[in-house]
Each structure stands twice: as C-alpha cells, then as structure tokens.
Image: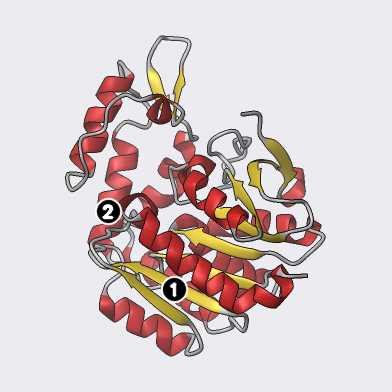
Amino acid sequence: MTPTMLTGHQGHPIAASIEGGEQAFPVVLAHGGGQTRRAWKAVSKLLASHGFRAIAIDMRGHGDSSWATDGAYDIRDFASDLVAIAQASARKPALIGASLGGLAGIIAEGELSRDSFASLTLVDITPQMEPEGVARVVGFMAAHAREGFASPEEAAHIISQYLPHRPSRKASPGLQRYLRLGENGRYYWHWDPAFIEGVMQARITDVELIDRRRATLSAAASQLRLPVHLIRGGSSDLVSPEAVAHFRSLVPHADYSDIAEATHMVVGDKNDAFGQAIVEFLVRTHGAEVAR
C-alpha cells in the first residue's frame, strides 16, 4: 500500500499508514529500532474500530521514510520528527512508542516541546535499560546490516534464532516487506545501516555515555505531566522490575501494565493482551474527546 507522506523535522519525509476517520482522535504509533510501521498493523485496525485515527509511522531511516544522508540518527532527531508531526496535526495526538519510539517520545514531550501530545504510552522502555538486553538487540541488528542475506529464507532463519520462543518464521510476504532487494541480488533490512553503526552500537560500549543517556532520559521523564502508560513485557530482558520502579518514582502518576509471557517484543509476542491494555488506557483517558 502506498504510504501517506508526513513531514518530520526540517522537512524530513516520514511515511505513514493511517486507519480511521479524518475527524477521529489521532494516535501516532512509533515503532522500535529496525522495525517499520507494519509492526502496528493489527493494533491500528483495533484502534480504528474503537473510534481512533491510528497513524503508524516509519521512523526516519526506516521503511519508506527517507534516510538521513547526514547521519542524523540521534534520539533527539527522532524526537524532533515526532514533535513536527504532532504540531502539524489538527488535534493534539496521543503517542504510543515502542523501544526507540518510546525513547523519542520521552525526549519529545519531556525535553523538546512539552504539551505536544495528549498522552504517552511507552512499550517496554524506560530510562534505565538493562545493558545485556540492549546488547542483544543491537547485536542482532548489527550482525547483518551491511552484508544482508542471500534469500528471505536466510533472514527468516536468523529471526528464528533471535526469537526462539516464537514458532519458526517462514519467508512469508509479511517478512519480505521488512526486506529490500539490492542491485546485487541480496536482501537487506528495510532500514539504514548507519542508524545502528553510528548511534546505537557506540552507546553500548561506552559506560560514561550510557550513564549520560540515562541521566538525560530520567530528567526528561521527570518532566512528563501528561497522562502516561508504561507497558512492560513480563519476560523482558531490557526493562527490569527495578527499572519500572525507578520510572514510577520519576512519573508517579503513570499507569502501568505488565503483559505476562511477553518479551521486549511485546506487540508481536502478545498482540491481543497488548491491544486490550492500550485501548483501555486510551478510552479511559480520552473517551470524552473520542466521542466528540
């Protein structure tokens, strides 16, 4: 499906898939690193069925959004795109951010431009991330960023090794939408390798930088005044119970949901339970506005 093109920071083209009526209450969905807007397909349909307008975006450098030719993949670059999208909306949107999208949401609302969003839902992400979990995610993304795969079947095999708790994934049309075919006949992830090489990989090996990032995110989180909902995967190796407690000390008014048997990939692991949790929060928080 041809995406709708939105405008991010400094005119950066951002691709989006939209479900729901034009006058419905808007909800922006920002995926995790290495994913695309298609990760929200089922969630978007669910939100639309409850009277929301789901706007699932490809973060810069991902999917059908433009790559940053200047390597602008700092968390504030992603956050600035979210602010630009929110400010262009006719109604202040809610934001649901998974992993990278959630980090960008914290910075967008807590540091760059407060009062940009009507609410913020964070999916398995807090300022205090477990280094081992981050290393596992980054290692998976970096391993084949440049060399790619000989076939979609090879990519499916690598994903199965990364997600052993899920049934083995076949080289389905759905999977192939996360890949792009290079001129050399090899398949590559549908995101810019510079994203992982220039930003995330450096951060997991620099203790001082990790501490500064945690401090920056914690400071931004402490400034969140809008309704907030933290959703954790019950089996997450990225967000520990201690990290949840730290976040709730910073944002004491936040709602909290724990999705049993879900890992960091909450949306893909337990989509039904996740969908129920976000709909309950959004309806409870924005029900009166949705009914307008």
How packed mark 1 is, by other alpha carbons closer than 10 Å (few <14, some 14-19, many 20 or more), is: many
Q: Residue at x 45, y 49 (%)?
A: 199
Image quadrant holding the N terminus, namely top right
The answer to which of marks 2 and 1 sits earlier in the sequence is 2
Q: Residue 92, image x and y in percent?
A: 74, 67
Q: Residue at x 28, y 80 (%)?
A: 242
Q: Residue 148, image x and y in percent?
A: 35, 24
How packed mark 2 is, by other alpha carbons closer than 10 Å (few <14, some 14-19, many 20 or more), is: some
- Compared with residue 252, is residue 166 higher up or lower down, i.e. above or below? above
- Compared with residue 77, is residue 14 higher up or lower down, i.e. above or below? above
Q: Residue at x 38, y 57 (%)?
A: 272
Secondary structure type for disc 2: helix
Marks 2 and 1 close (CB-CB < 8 Å): no
Quadrant of residue 3 within the rendered picture: top right
Q: Amino acid at mark 2?
A: Ala
Q: Residue at x 41, y 78 (%)?
A: 256
The front one of 55 and 45 is: 45
- Compared with residue 218, is residue 274 higher up or lower down, i.e. above or below? above
Quadrant of residue 113 within the rendered picture: bottom right
Residue occupied by mark 1: 230
Question: Furthest residue to the right?
Answer: 90
Q: Give the number of callouts.
A: 2
Q: Amino acid at mark 1?
A: Leu
Q: Residue 142, image x and y in percent?
A: 33, 39
Quadrant of residue 292 within the rendered picture: bottom right
Residue occupied by mark 2: 135
Question: Furthest residue to the top?
Answer: 184
Secondary structure type for disc 1: strand
